[in-house]
Image (cartoon, rainbow, N blue to C red):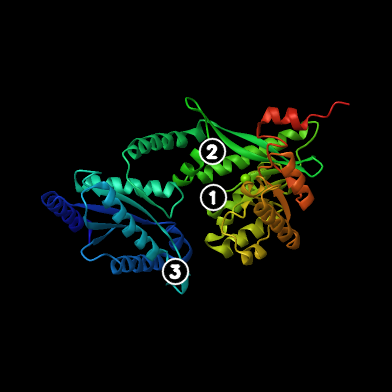
Amino acid sequence: MNRHAFLDHVETELARADRHVAGFALLFIDVDEFKQINDVLGHAAGDEYLRLTAARLAAHLRAGDLLCRWGSDEFIVLALDLEPEAGPAASLAQSVAFSLAEVLAQPVKVADQEVQLNASIGIALYPGDGKDAAELIQRAELAMSRAKQAGRNQIHFYRPEMQSDAARRMTLGRELRQALAAKQFLLYYQPQVDAAGRLIGAEALVRWHHPERGLVSPGEFIPLAEELGLIGSLGEWVLADGVAWLGKLNGAAQALPMLSVNVSARQFHEAGFAERCLAVLRHAGISPERVELEVTESLLLADIDGALAKIGALREAGFGFAVDDFGTGYSSLAYLKRLPVQKLKIDRSFVQDVHRDEKNAAIVRTIIALAKNLGMQTIAEGAERREEVDFLIEAGCDAFQGYYFGKPLASDEFIRRWLTAAPQ
Ligand SMILES: [Mg+2]
């Protein structure tokens, strides 16, 4: 059903629901990471996937419910005959959403490839959440985008505070676009040490110094930058500023051996990423051997061969690679085997309490053994206590980063604390 006919239906149902003291729900469904299919398998495959998606949704609707293809990878389901009270209506709408999400999560064959994508779903209820079709759809869509922001593959109900959140995010988004030009970002550096406590490197961590809000946390602006397509420019700025700093440090009493820089999956997959990294280092006069790119396992969710080739080319040029937050993502050992990285960063969630949490201890030992057998090194993230560090050293972990050794510091402080010659 097209948009126009669908809107007519919703208006009809509004009147009918009012007459019969009933309710209904609008489920706004958006396929997660759909763009990847177009990017990797081509537009014909993308269209085929959407046709199959529409067919699968249609085949699993309850009798009487309606489906509309709203946008390219957006669908709306009108779930009818609900209770007028929000509570019972919400639980039924939620079960409808769950079953549709489950249907979509089944793998399908497209262009001879097995494709598995999830969906984010936002729900708005009538009569509670809006007075007409346009308002209900806008609110269901808002709830859907909130589900995306919360990590995708989720179902969210519309809540009134989402309106003000959305307004705040819009402002923040506009300011984020200006922040790069206005040079409001700065880097903090967190030391990385070996088992003897010697400095082996630092991770560059970006901070946003907002003129009015003060320091905005990366947890808030990094996902927004990804969403707005700004992560590529931000990531490049981090690399450029970090290596420029590394260059300046050559005058300090001690040089910093190596700098780690985070690279998001989206940034990594952008065309020309490898070339731009090389250009930035050439410009700064820094050898790629002194830079380690931290990537996450999600890098390998799409275009694995392309990703491996890109990493291979950068490795060839001298860059180091570490897998960040290792153990929390999409860990396929088959890919790990092919991945030309030399370091695994053990995620902080496993490091926490590792000396007394038996499960964490088992996971950490396994990761270290795996790394050793694959010829890789390990660095533990989030090491905060002596006991954790003792355990990690005993288990054979090569390096450490965390509050126990040092928190992220602004450049001057980092130099004072870590790079000034020790008093005789
Ligand atoms: Mg990192």
According to the picture, the residue beneath numbered tag 1 turns out to be: 267
Between discs 3 and 1, the one toward the N terminus: 3
* Residue at the image position 13 percent from the left and 49 percent from the top: 18
| Mark 1 residue type | Gln
Find ligand 1 in the image and state its quadrant. Answer: top right
Q: Residue at x 57, y 34 (%)?
A: 207
Instruction: State whether residue 52 is above or below residue 323.
Output: below
Viewer-nearest residue: 127 or 241: 127
Q: Which residue is mark 2?
A: 218
- Circles 2 and 1: CB distance less than 8 Å? no
Answer whether labels 3 and 2 touch (C-beta < 8 Å). Answer: no
Label disc, if present, on residue 107 of the rendered structure:
3
Q: Amino acid at mark 3?
A: Pro
Mark 2–mark 1 distance (CA, rounded to whole Å): 16 Å
Q: Position of residue 122 (x, y in %)?
A: 34, 51
Q: Residues within 10 Å of mark 1 (few under 14, many from 20)?
A: many
- Amino acid type at image mark 2: Pro
Which secondary structure, mark 2? helix
What percent of the width, then of the height, locates residue 381? 66, 45
The mark closer to the camera, 2 or 1, is 2
Give the Cα distance between marks 3 and 2.
34 Å
227 versus 97 height, above or below: above
- Asked if residue 65 is positioned above or below residue 91 in the image, the reply reads below
Q: 73 or 119: nearer the eye?
A: 119
Residue 298 screen position, x and y as percent: 55, 56
